[in-house]
Image: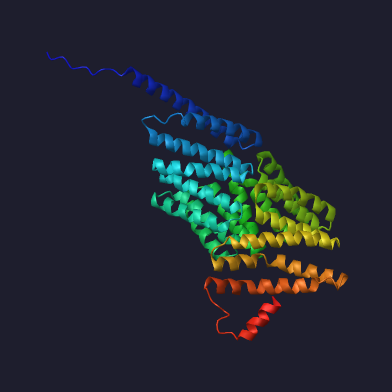
Amino acid sequence: MAIARQHPVNVAQITQTNSLDAILAAAELAYQQGKQLYEQGTAESLLKAIAKFEQALSLYRQMSDHPGKQNIYSLEAGTLVYIGKVYSNLGEKHKALDYYKQSLPLSQQAGDKQSEGTTLNNIGKIYSELAEKQKALDYYNQSLSLRRQVGDKNGEAISLNNIGSVYHFLGEKQKALDYYNQSLFIKRQLGNNAGIATTLNNIGKVYLDLAENQKALSYFSQALVLYQQAKDAEKEGIPTALSNIGTVYLELAQQQKALSYFSQALVLYRKAGDKGGIATALNNIGKAYSNLGEHQKALNYYNQSLPLYQQMGNKAREARTLYNIASVQYDSSNLQAALTQIETVIKIVENLRTKIDSQELRTSYFATVQNYYEFYIDLLMQLHKQRPSAGYDALALQTSERARARSLLELLAEANANIRQGVEPKLLSQERNLQ
């Protein structure tokens, strides 16, 4: 009987493998505990979740020699994404962006296209919240392409929804509705109620901007019911739907009803530690009090909202809140204070506009902020009446002309058109003298 030849046993290798498996098990336990804390959704549980995810991350990083290295890359990437999500929920958008960007190359090394698509979408969401809409659009489109490649239908629906939100912000309402409806169709096929609710909310916002208030209210009310029926982890959309319903009542001049919905939303946002939601609810409450003529109450709420948007780096919302403050100050005949605020608003808008590559999208975005310029010009003319020799009328004219001419000048610059070619030297000389 032949005796089988025995291979020498590598004790060190077995010990190392067992040790790595123990580390992997500990990392997985910390990760799962972090997920459970994240899903509780309170400010306290989110901070505890970060500690657990950081613990898991540290353990995964000790496993560079593990035979399943590709899998470890994927697990590490997923942990970084969760830490990014927690920081995003807490309103620390730049921290969230940093963790998402750390995650992206790990997903690529792991060859995990589905995770890569998710991370690209998350990066796009942060850029969108920081009002860097062109960057957001670029990342969302990359995400959409990858999600379609791997057949991730739920992910595809999310990316479509997010692309719609960028076009909505930029004033392209029909494009926004097209993307939202594509997203809604897929979500309904999947039976994803929380996802359906999110898109219904967004469609409602478009109709609100189109002054179709009853249509908007119908979409927001449908969204609220679906959020209330969702699992605990998916109920985070409830305060958003409440806030949106309140905004409809604001437009319908039913201020007390609006205040009731905004106050309910504020309680839920505070419970979740959602800094962006808290800022929005405070801003909305301020608007309701402004409409009621209670100027000091309105200013108090706006002034609570403003630093939250500034902390998050949300320049578009910061501009909107400053505009609201300026409006109250104008109504209170505090014109110089209003001037200071609206000049800051104009600077923010001009800066945001330069970050949009497409001339068409720059133009449509500019149309969404025309009310800021109109307010600024009206304010300057009111100041001119008070002090006719201070030059406010000239500044108003200059602002009006710059606003009207800007799109034409950008088109010419984009086309590299030399509008001075062939012009008489005498006219060029006059232009230089005027400048």
Point 63% across, 66% down: residue: 366
Quadrant of residue 217 in the image? Answer: bottom right
Question: Could you say where residue 263 lies in the image, as x and y percent from the top left?
Answer: 74, 47
Q: Name, please, the residue furthest toward the right.
A: 386
What is the quadrant of the N terminus in the image? Answer: top left
Q: Residue 301, image x and y in percent?
A: 78, 50
Asked if residue 257 lies left or right of residue 114, the reply is right
Residue at image location 73% in from the left, 50% down from the top: 306
Q: Where is residue 404 in the image (x, y as percent from the top left)?
A: 66, 74
- The percent position of residue 78, horizontal first and vertical second, equals 48, 38
Front residue of 119 and 282: 119
Residue 366 visible to the viewer: yes
Name the quadrant containing residue 231.
top right
Instruction: Pick the residue in front: 207 or 380.
Output: 380
In which image quadrant can residue 378 be found? bottom right
Residue 253 appears in view: no
Q: Is residue 295 above or below residue 57?
A: below
Closer-to-camera residue (353/327)? 353
Q: Residue at x 47, y 31 (%)?
A: 60
Quadrant assignment for the C terminus = bottom right
